[in-house]
Amino acid sequence: MLFKKIGTLPIFWCCILLLYTEITMATPSIALVANAAHQSILNRTKLALETSPGFNAKIHKITLHDNKASPKLITDTLDEFTLIVPIGSKATRAVIKSKTQTPILSILIRKYAFDAMVDKYHLDKKSGLNVSAIYLDQPIERQLNFVEAILEKQDKEQMIGVLLGPHSSRLTEKLLSEAKIRDLKLKIVKVNHNENPVEYLDLLLEDAKILLAIPDSKVYNPKTARGMLLTAYRKRVPIVGFSKTYVCNGAMASLSSTPKQIVLQAANQIVAYLNNQDKKLPPPSFTDGYRVNINQGVAKSLGLELDSDTSIYYALKQREDYTSITNEGKVCRYDMKKYDRIQQVEL
Amino acid sequence: MVNEWGIKTRVLFLTLVPTITISLLLSAYFTSTRIQDLEESLKDRGYAIALKLAPASEYGVFSANTKTLQQLAAEALSEPEVRLVSIFNKEGKLLAHAGHENKEDAVILSVKDQPNGVMMADTGSSLLFTVPITIRDVIIEDYAYADSPYDQPHQHDNVIGWISIELSRTTTTLRQYQVLFACGVIIFIGLAISGIFAYRMGRDVTRPILQMAYAVEKIKNGDYNTRVYTHARGELRHLEAGINTMGTALKAAHEEMQQSIEQATADLRQTLETIEIQNIELEMARKEAETASRVKSEFLANMSHEIRTPLNGVIGFINLLMKTKLNSRQTDYLSTIHKSATSLLSIINDILDFSKIEAGKLSLDQIPMDLPDCIEDALTLMAPSAHEKALELVPMIYTDVPEKIIGDHLRLKQIITNLVNNSIKFTHSGSVIVRVMLEKETHKHVVLCVSITDSGIGLSKEEQKSLFQAFKQADSTTTRKFGGTGLGLVISKRLVQQMGGEIGVESEEDKGSTFWFTFLADKAKEQTTILPRNDLKGHKVLIYEPHPTTRLSLNHLFSRWEMIVKDISSTENIDAILTDAKKKGAPFDFVIIGVNQPDASGHFIEELINLIKGKHNCPVGVLLNSTEQIIHDAIFDAGAALCQAKPIRRKRLYDAITEVLTHVPQDEDIPEDVQIKLPTLRIPNSDKLTVLTVDDYEANLKLVNALLEDVGINVFCATNGKDALQLVAQHSFDLILMDIQMPEMDGIEVTNRIRSSEPPGVHTPIIALTAHALLSEREELLCAGMDDYLTKPINEQELQRVIAKWTNKQTLININSAFEKAPTTHSTHKIVSNVPIDWKLSLKLAGFKPALAKEMLEGLIETLPKGQTNINKAFSMNNLTSMREHVHHLHGACCYAGVPHLKAAAANLETAITEKAHDKIQFMMVELNKEINKILAFIKNNKDILNTLSQELPSKHKPTKTEEIH
């Protein structure tokens, strides 16, 4: 029924502006789909693609208008492309909703969001559909490494508090196992769907001396952020966030990928896909490159003394390399399902 | 109303109203703005504080750090006007509080939402701000939120608590009041300043204007020295200058005018003085002229009088001389002298009349008169001169003319005489016809027209114009031809004018002329009913008259007497007519033959009389234009039943014809009435009379004496009053003839003395002799105690009549004549009739029973002395009531006796008593006494008269009834 609606009333369901739709069977074409908020990333991606050696395809930019909560794409049009690259979760959701058979490489998307979409649209069960993503998140290991790096000068015995929401609760075992590996004390508190995370945070911070924020929109959102920051500040607990903005707004430190890093990785993968004969997308993956963000002001007001970004980055890099060495192939080569399965197996 | 405002008010109005309006509007605007600003600023401050406080307390509320919050609240309270700060958490729990304890809930007047969720409540005295404390969103994602499936949070979810701030309004209100006060003060000061300015300005304008108006008013009132100095500026200074200039100019003009007025007045005064002098001179001249005129008139009157007196003597003696035996030549001379003297007298009379008229001394009588008589009298007088010229003189009195009128018969007669005389004078042949017509009749008056038509030489138009001017005749040549003074017409004209009429002439040369005049006359009060003259009714009369007008006149006359008239103009058929009438069985009873002048040689009349009388046995009457006795006698001899001169007198003719027709004529020769006319009246027993004549002019005295002695009267003479009085004292006179104008003592004074010396009951009749025949004089004379008067020149007959009237010795004849005269001077007038007893009236009242009449008279006479005494007594006692009683009694007694005068006197007295008119009563008393004395004297003097009367008179008079015919 949904399909029917889409097929019969495409104009009413979609507000898509096709800049140009000249498609030839000879040259592959790539559609870059993004909403208005991600236009800069879209342009960067396009630029990166065009500048990539061995790239020979036509790039179509499709801008989604944010007016509709879940914009639809015209299936017929999308079907013409060789590859669709949705930027951001909204674009990804729109493309997936269009039921296109064209392979999709989603970028700039949180892992829990992509997983939820995959679950929702049963993408893994459809054999024919070729879906992959480059996550915005940093892998748990890297994050724990980062905390470890920060705490290097401090007391290593300090309790690390983690607040998990409904989306991120599945990472509990992963966290625990990874912490165990690194000999870190971890306290995890789970927040249910309708509960105020700040109150839990207050509870959590009775014991924890540092808070590691795992992205979950139910726990960390702009609304709760201030309360959490204030609470943490009152408790004199530093927060390790997950974005550079978070650091600017009161978190003490964070790990994040720069747009350039994301775009280059995406371009590489697209070129690889285009040049690949079997036309198979790699499994979803985290970004390879990252960056360390430190708010020295916060650190000082909390009475902590941290190293500079660079030194921490390098300290982290060392540990990463170490980790990579120790866990070579384990992490990088995992596709999403495999990763999950492994984790579950390990648990 | 706005139009009646003065300048000051207008200026005030114009200045103050916009100022007030603008200042009020501005101050209202600014004040309200200021107040609003204050209010706004309070709100803003509250709002700002609230907004400032909200984020500040964010953390405190979030973390429920009441200590921090308390501190915050206390800090906020230090802000001015903040009274209360309360901080609540989301659930409404009070976290912190500063300021006064809000025990009681303030009444919230209004609630207003402000931006950022601030709510402002107004409690009147304070503002209450309630601000939500929110936690702001913090961006924690690098890339847009959209990347995380995060729902937009609801606003309220952000609210973590509430801050309530109360701001006191006290300061603001105080400031607002300050603003208001300041504004009011500023307005007041502004208004006062502008008011003062406006007032001053208005005053600056009005005061000069008022001063100028005052000055103009003063100038208007004549104060030309007024100047205005107002120190005004601008237009007002121009005005001021103008007024001052005007004042100067006016003053100059006024002075100039004053000067010229004075000049003119002086001139005028001078002129007036000159005129005054001239007036005085003129007045003097006029007076001189008047005096001269008066002197001239007086001279004229005196002269004419003086001339008349000897002339009267001359005429008198001529008359006497004519009675003596004279030869024919002497008679001829004497008649010439008489004629000349008479014409001289008439001329002098004319002059006298004229001078009287000129002097305005002529007054007219107003007495009852018989108009036809008067006219006939005048014509009879003129008959001889008409007869001389063989002219027909025909009176024609129209039937509608009233017979009795009130007027001056003498003057009327004079006018007619003048005019007829004039006509006769200028007519050689033909006729002179006098017509009397009624022109207009009102209730009281009649206007009568008398016209005299002649067949004379006539008058040209030019002559007519100057006809009625004094001393002029129609033609200067005619004066020579015809003679005359030329005063006749002028006198006539004046008389007619005085009678209220007009006079005129219509004439054509050689065809005769018609003089006419009208006059106004009162109708006689007692218009005696015309007694029916029906004695001749039904008798047939034949008239022969050659002159047509006379014939017509006769015809009318006889027709009026209801006779059957036939007139003929020739004698040819007279025999046939008479025979014819006899045959028819209606013979003529009488034949009137009218002739002009009897043919001296022919026997026309005699033949005619013989024919008629002899053949037809019909009485004949002859009317002829002659008064000669010889001719009359000749005609009587021829057998005429009557012979009368024309113009006929109706009464005489009527009487004569009646006599002829109703009685078989026994004494054919001499008809009775003709005999009466003969001037041979003698007074039997006159020798018993003693008369005193008083006159200073001896000729007159002699004449009168001669006349009286002729009839055998004893005459005593006196040439002045003294002598007269002496004689009166010595002798007893039956009559005194008294001249009025005498030197030393005039007639009136003498009369008064005689009267005063007369013993009571004795009354000697005194007859005045006067040349002045004016009514007023007459009255004066009568009042002076005289009994009658005679006008000079003394006429013999008149003299005898008067003597007969006042001396009752010739009873029979006197009474006869008295009866004739009495009706003409009826009792209404003061000229009392001389016979106190009217026997005829007595008879009439007694139903023609002589015995009864006598009885009544005797009864009255018996009671008279007693009544007189009673009345006099009552009068002297001034007892009007008893007096009236007695007078009434006397009046009643008089009613049945023939004493008309006494009756009239009694009636008048009674009326006077009733009206209580005292002066009148006194006069009437005298009259009554006079009458009573008269009757008593009469009876005393004629003791047997009553017996005589009762036996003789009725038999003689009753059958004839002549008395009843007037």
Image (tube, rainbow, N blue to C red):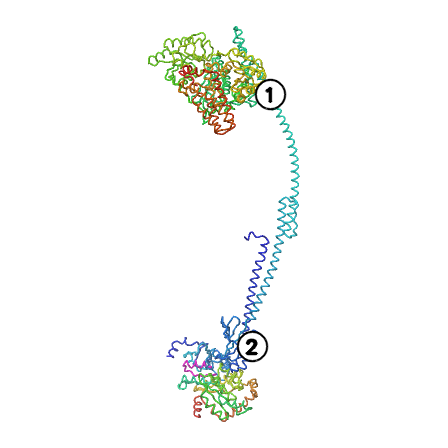
The C terminus of chain B: image quadrant:
top left
Residue B624 sits in which quadrant?
top left
Q: Please name which of the two marks, 1 or 2, marks the residue nearer to the observer.
A: 1
Subunit ID for the residue under disc 2: B
Residue B802 in sight from this viewpoint: yes
Across and down, in percent, residue B30 comes to: 56, 65
Across and down, in percent, residue A202 comes to: 50, 86
Q: In the depicted view, which residue is nearer to us: A57 or A108? A: A108
Taking B429 as reference, is A221 above or below it? Answer: below
Residue B304 in magenta stretch: no
Residue A106 in magenta stretch: yes
Q: Where is mark 1, residue-wise? A: B296
Q: In the depicted view, which residue is nearer to us: B918 or B358? A: B918
Across and down, in percent, residue B339 comes to: 53, 12
Magenta part of the chain:
A86-109
Q: In the depicted view, which residue is nearer to us: A6 or A247? A: A247
Residue B198 sits in which quadrant?
bottom right
Mark 1 is on which residue type? Lys
Q: Distance between the residues labelled 1 and 2?
A: 150 Å
Question: What residue sits 52% from the left and 72% below the top?
Answer: B127
Taking B129 as reference, is B294 above or below it? Answer: above
Give the label on residue B76, or none: 2
Question: What residue sits 65% from the left and 40% below the top?
Answer: B258
Around disc 2, counting alpha carbons within 10 Å, would you say few (fewer than 14), some (14 to 19), or many (20 or more)?
many
Q: Is mark 2 on a helix, strand or loop?
A: helix
Mark 2 is on which residue type? Ala
Subunit ID for the residue under disc 1: B
Taking B33 as reference, is B942 above or below it? Answer: above
Q: Please give the count of numbered marks on the rendered protein.
A: 2
Give the label on residue B30, or none: none
